Image (cartoon, grey):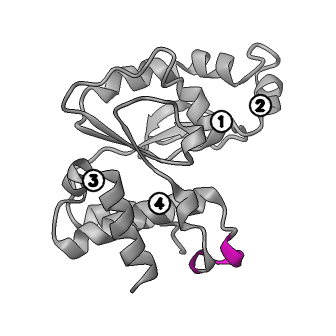
């Protein structure tokens, strides 16, 4: 079985005995733990017309469907339990979280790492944004045109590999490292080795 980069990163974290919880934003079920057993479905926030069709027009768009699934409420309920929150989302999935409406409330000790294009991420001062567009090059195949979700997944995987090489806890590394240092480490790891 060939694993995608995010699944490889999760497997590496388990191998390192890292202490973490992994949630998935599902267009069918809302915000769920990754190990939640679900029935297969065919709906995505990337195709908003699906929402109206699947719900017989009870919910006409992503926002109404997200409210029905109580996605933001679930996020607000769980986010206070973590010192480091990592988002690997894009586009319409980011919008569904409504992180700036109202602004996501964080404790002073909490940090957020968002791996996505800066124009997709809400302007929240405490967010560290790792921009995958700076890593589009020949190494990522297809003449640098790898799908953005794969670039985000690869960056996350590489960060976990870097922490393993440094023999430090990957989440401590992400929590303490400034974004420009993280970018430099990634550049060294991805392009100079």
Q: Quadrant of residue 149?
A: bottom right
Residue 92 is marked as: 1
**Circle 1: is it few (<14), some (14-19), or many (20+) Cα within 10 Å?**
some
Check disc 1 and report its element: helix, strand or loop: helix
Q: Quadrant of residue 51?
A: top right
29 or 88: nearer the viewer? 88
Judged by depth in the image, the label closer to the viewer, 4 or 3, is: 3
Is 140 colored magenta in this rendering? yes
47 or 184: nearer the viewer? 184
Q: x%, y% of residue 130?
A: 44, 52
Q: Are marks 1 and 3 in contact (CB under 8 Å)?
A: no
Q: Which residue lies under the disc numbered 4?
A: 6
Q: Which residue lies under the disc numbered 3?
A: 174
The vertical placement of 113 against 109, above or below, is: below
Q: x%, y% of residue 73?
A: 44, 17
Q: Are marks 1 and 2 in contact (CB under 8 Å)?
A: yes
The residue at the point 53 percent across, 37 percent down is: 121
Q: x%, y% of residue 172?
A: 19, 53
The residue at the point 20 percent across, 61 percent down is: 17
Judged by depth in the image, the label closer to the viewer, 1 or 2, is: 1
Report, in whole angstroms, how far the alpha carbon at label 2 lies from the one at label 3.
34 Å
**Circle 4: is it few (<14), some (14-19), or many (20+) Cα within 10 Å?**
some
Magenta residues span: 139-144
Report, in whole angstroms, how far the alpha carbon at label 1 lies from the one at label 3.
25 Å
Q: Which residue lies under the disc numbered 2?
A: 48
């Amino acid at each position: 079985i060939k694993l995608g980069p995010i699944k490889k990163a999760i497997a590496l974290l388990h191998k390192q005995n890292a202490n973490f919880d992994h949630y998935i934003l599902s267009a069918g079920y809302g915000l769920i733990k990754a190990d939640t057993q679900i029935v297969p479905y065919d709906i995505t926030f990337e195709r908003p017309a699906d929402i109206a069709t699947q719900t017989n027009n009870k919910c006409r768009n992503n926002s109404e469907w997200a409210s029905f699934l109580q996605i933001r409420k679930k996020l607000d309920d769980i986010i206070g339990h973590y010192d480091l929150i990592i988002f690997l989302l894009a586009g319409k999935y980011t919008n569904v979280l409504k992180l700036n409406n109202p602004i996501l409330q964080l404790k002073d000790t909490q940090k957020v790492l968002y791996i996505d294009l800066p124009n997709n991420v809400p302007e929240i001062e405490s967010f560290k944004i790792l921009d995958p567009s700076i890593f589009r090059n020949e190494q990522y195949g297809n003449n640098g045109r790898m799908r953005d979700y794969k670039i985000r997944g690869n960056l996350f995987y590489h960060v976990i590999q870097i922490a393993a090489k440094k023999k430090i806890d990957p989440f401590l590394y992400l929590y303490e490292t400034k974004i420009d240092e993280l970018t430099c480490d990634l550049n060294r790891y991805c392009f100079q080795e």
